[in-house]
Amino acid sequence: MQRGKINIRSTLGDIALNPTGFPNRVASTMSFNPTTRQFSILPTGLTFDYYVKGNVYTSTGNTQIINNNNGAHFLYYDSSGSFTYSQNAWDILNTAPIAYIF
């Protein structure tokens, strides 16, 4: 049985033209304190850049206290560039994942 075909060049082109993530991995640093449950992503200089779906954002850093609920905790920048923390998994195509804490 033949399955539907995809245009891989078109699909990969869309992804390649809309970068997501951190262009300079040494421009920021992450930490997690298990006692206070505080997660931080901070610049190693004054700021760091990140991309979400081709849009570039600049951050001076973010800090979040993670609740003590059982299960996975996802930290990411959402499609509007906002720092977000959730127990629901991120949408890998529409967010810039930062960290996963269990």
Image (cartoon, rainbow, N blue to C red):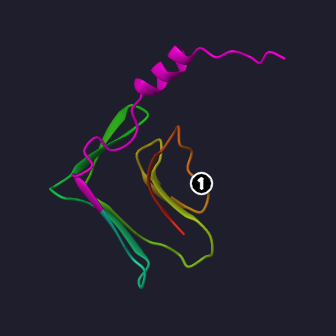
Quadrant of the image occupied by residue 34: bottom left
Can residue 60 be seen? no
Which quadrant of the figure has residue 70? bottom right
Circle 1: residue type:
Ala
85 left or right, relative to 70: left
Which residue appears at 60% of the width and 63% of the height?
Answer: 87
- Residue 99 spot, x, y in % from top left: 44, 59
On the rendered structure, is 4 left or right of 22? right
Q: Residues within 10 Å of mark 1 (few under 14, many from 20)?
A: some
Expressed as whole percent of the image width and height from the top left, the position of residue 81 reads 40, 45
Asked if residue 44 lies in the magenta stretch, the reply is no
SS majority, magenta: loop
Identify whether 87 is placed above or below 93.
Answer: below
Residue at the extreme left: 45
Q: Is residue 73 left or right of residue 6?
A: left
Residue tagged 1:
89
Residue situated in front as seen by the camera: 36 or 12: 12
Q: Is residue 86 left or right of residue 48?
A: right
- Any part of residue 11 in sight: yes
Closer to us: 66 or 21:
21
Q: Where 83 falls versus 67 (above or below)?
A: above
Magenta segment: does it hold 23? yes
Part of the protein shown in magenta: 1-29
Q: Which residue is depicted at the point 55% across and 50% down?
A: 90
